[in-house]
Image (tube, rainbow, N blue to C red):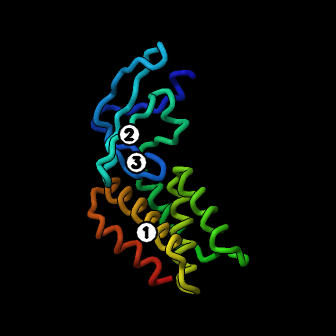
Amino acid sequence: MSMGTEVQFKVGDKAVYPAQGVAEVVSIEEKDIAGSRQRFYVLRILDTDRKIMVPVTNAKAVGLRSVISEEEIREIFDILRERTIAFDNQTWNRRYRGFMDKIKTGSIYDVAEVMRDLYRLKTDKQLSFGERRMLDTARSLIVKEIAIARSQTEEQVRNEIEAIFLSN
């Protein structure tokens, strides 16, 4: 893998780990793995305090990325405002699997679509327990990342997002 495709983070940087949320790079360590020396980002997930080690050369492949920009935040709000969702009458577990796959991509846009779709679905029918938890997860991932990107409180971001759904 060429150095150009490596995601480059420094100690103290914030990074987003798919389905886990925003993490802080607490150190970069070298370890011997199967006889070869590898560098690892040691990440602390801000929400849970869990530590995760990601090989530096694998960071892009696992979906480790920088925190979103203000322009990307505007795109997320546009996604949340969209009214068009088509749920042919899929069973809840098929829908759930599709949503779970989107959350695991690590794309904040996919997570925003899951949140929007579950939020809209909630106005038509009661969500299953799994869908309610997934809505909470999607909302939490989005709120936390935007709060960190904008240096706002999570409550401020949550209120801004709730306003989108109330006015729509």
Q: Which residue is mark 1?
A: 136
Q: Position of residue 158 (x, y in %)?
A: 35, 70
- Quick one: 71 or 106, which is closer to the camera? 106
Outermost top residue: 35
Which residue is at 31% across, 43% downward? Answer: 44
Residue type marked 3: Val
Q: CA distance from mark 3 to mark 2?
A: 17 Å
Position of residue 101 in the picture relative to residue 149 (left or right):
right
- Crowding at mark 2 (Cα within 10 Å: few <14, some 14-19, many 20+): some
Q: Earlier in the sequence, mark 3 or mark 2?
A: 2
Q: Quadrant of the N terminus?
A: top right
Q: Position of residue 140 (x, y in %)?
A: 39, 63
Q: Is residue 83 above or below residue 139?
A: below
The image shows a total of numbered marks equal to 3
Outermost bottom residue: 124
Q: Position of residue 108 (x, y in %)?
A: 50, 55
Q: Earlier in the sequence, mark 2 or mark 1?
A: 2
Q: Is residue 140 above or below residue 38?
A: below
Q: Which residue is mark 3?
A: 67
Q: Which residue is mark 2?
A: 52
Nearer mark to the viewer, of 1 and 3 = 1
Q: Position of residue 24 (x, y in %)?
A: 31, 42
Position of residue 70 in the picture relative to residue 27 (left or right):
right
Q: Is residue 64 above or below residue 116?
A: above
Q: Secondary structure at mark 2?
A: strand
